[in-house]
Amino acid sequence: MTATTTVHKRAATGSLLGLALGDALGFPTEFSDVPSILAKCGPWREMELPTPAIVTDDTQMTLALGRGLRTAMDRGVLGPEMAEPVRQEFIAWNRSPENNRAPGNTCLTACDLLERPDRPWQDASQIHSKGCGANMRVAPLGLVPGLSDEQRAGAAQLQSALTHGHPTALAASDLTAHAVRLLAQGAEPTGLVGLLRSYAIENRSRYHHRWLGDLWTRSQDPGPEHFIARGWDECLEILGRLQDAVRTVSPETDPCLATGAGWIAEEALATGLLCFLLFADAPLTALRRAACTSGDSDSIACLAGAFAGAHLGSDAWPTEWADRIEYQGELVTLGALWDA
């Protein structure tokens, strides 16, 4: 796909709106099993966007990361110094009265620790947490134009490590940003899992020292390569399960049964991707399937929406949904900046 068609489809706007729409659709169904969701919402293929269309910390933290990246890139080439503006945005989110959407404990704990100016950010990182809180917000790094592969990977892992330092959280964030980037650039959904597996194998023992510093020393690993390989290996295992699921799973069954409930990073990535890949050309159906799951429905649906929007662009979403989403103005402004 040429650069002009990528701009024309407005992948960044589509991805950010899709992420927020999935988040709002999955917010009321999180913590419920599928029979309860069906009893409350009716047939899953007819689920309607709630009124008002309120999002969770997933979208709030995506916007916080987006603002931090904008500040960093206004100052020059994106590098490890982005940690400071992103840290400030995460602290501001943590303090905000709007932060009342059942945020994850890892984010809250890490953001409290990030307020200590005398300590390196690596000390705040929750080295044993691989909750999905880091990859649910990483989509902007797949959408920002003009980054090298090294910048995108390093920045995706760094933004994860500010809160979730487990190597699987780092690898899953890197993979999520890479998937969004591939789809925005026109990669075919049918080949996506294969491309992600190749990427994981290629990067399996690559520790981004420039971006992560001595983060790995907080773990029990004998060295940085050993540390990061643990994360990639867990992601490779779930990508294998995803590859089988795409071929064999009935769209009518709960996707969490195939690729996991999504509370942890690699499962959120795989189950979000599964919902997208089952309905690659029916984005609303993908969101509805993701929202009608027994696991972390808002995070699964927000990832499915980010993938679908990157693939199909802003026209994927009906105006009557897109216009009602909370933070619509900021999502569209950020998307337009990156689409330009």
Image: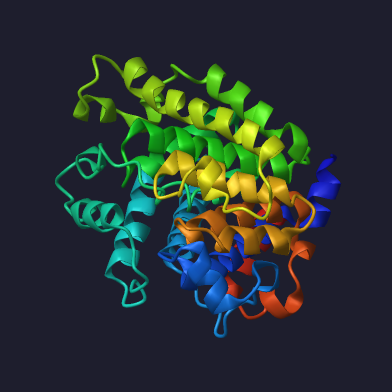
Q: Where is 320 relative to 333, above or below?
A: below
Where residue 334 sits in the image (x, y, percent)? 60, 62
- The residue positioned 33% from the left and 16% from the top of the image is 226
Q: Does residue 110 appear to the left or right of 271 in the view shown?
A: left
Where residue 126 sits in the image (x, y, percent)? 25, 43
Give the quarter of the image for residue 328.
bottom right
Which quarter of the rendered picture does the C terminus lie within?
bottom right
Give the quarter of the image for residue 240.
top right
Q: Is residue 147 visible?
A: no
Q: Does residue 240 appear to the left or right of 82 in the view shown?
A: right
Q: Where is 77 relative to 196, above or below?
A: below
Q: Is residue 334 visible?
A: yes
291 or 144, which is in the foreground? 291
Give the quarter of the image for residue 30.
bottom left
Where residue 281 sits in the image (x, y, percent)? 80, 53
- The residue positioned 44% from the left and 55% from the top of the image is 68
Q: Where is 212 relative to 60, above or below?
A: above
Q: Does residue 116 appear to the left or right of 279 in the view shown?
A: left
35 or 2, which is in the foreground? 35
Q: Where is 318 relative to 144, above or below?
A: below
Which quarter of the rendered picture does the N terminus lie within?
top right
- The residue positioned 47% from the left and 19% from the top of the image is 204
Q: How is the image coloured?
A: rainbow
**Residue found at the very far bottom of the displayed protein:** 51
221 or 275, which is in the foreground? 275
Q: Does residue 326 appear to the left or right of 33 in the view shown?
A: right
Where residue 70 sits in the image (x, y, percent)? 51, 55
**How many labels, in total?**
0
- The residue positioned 40% from the left and 50% from the top of the image is 263
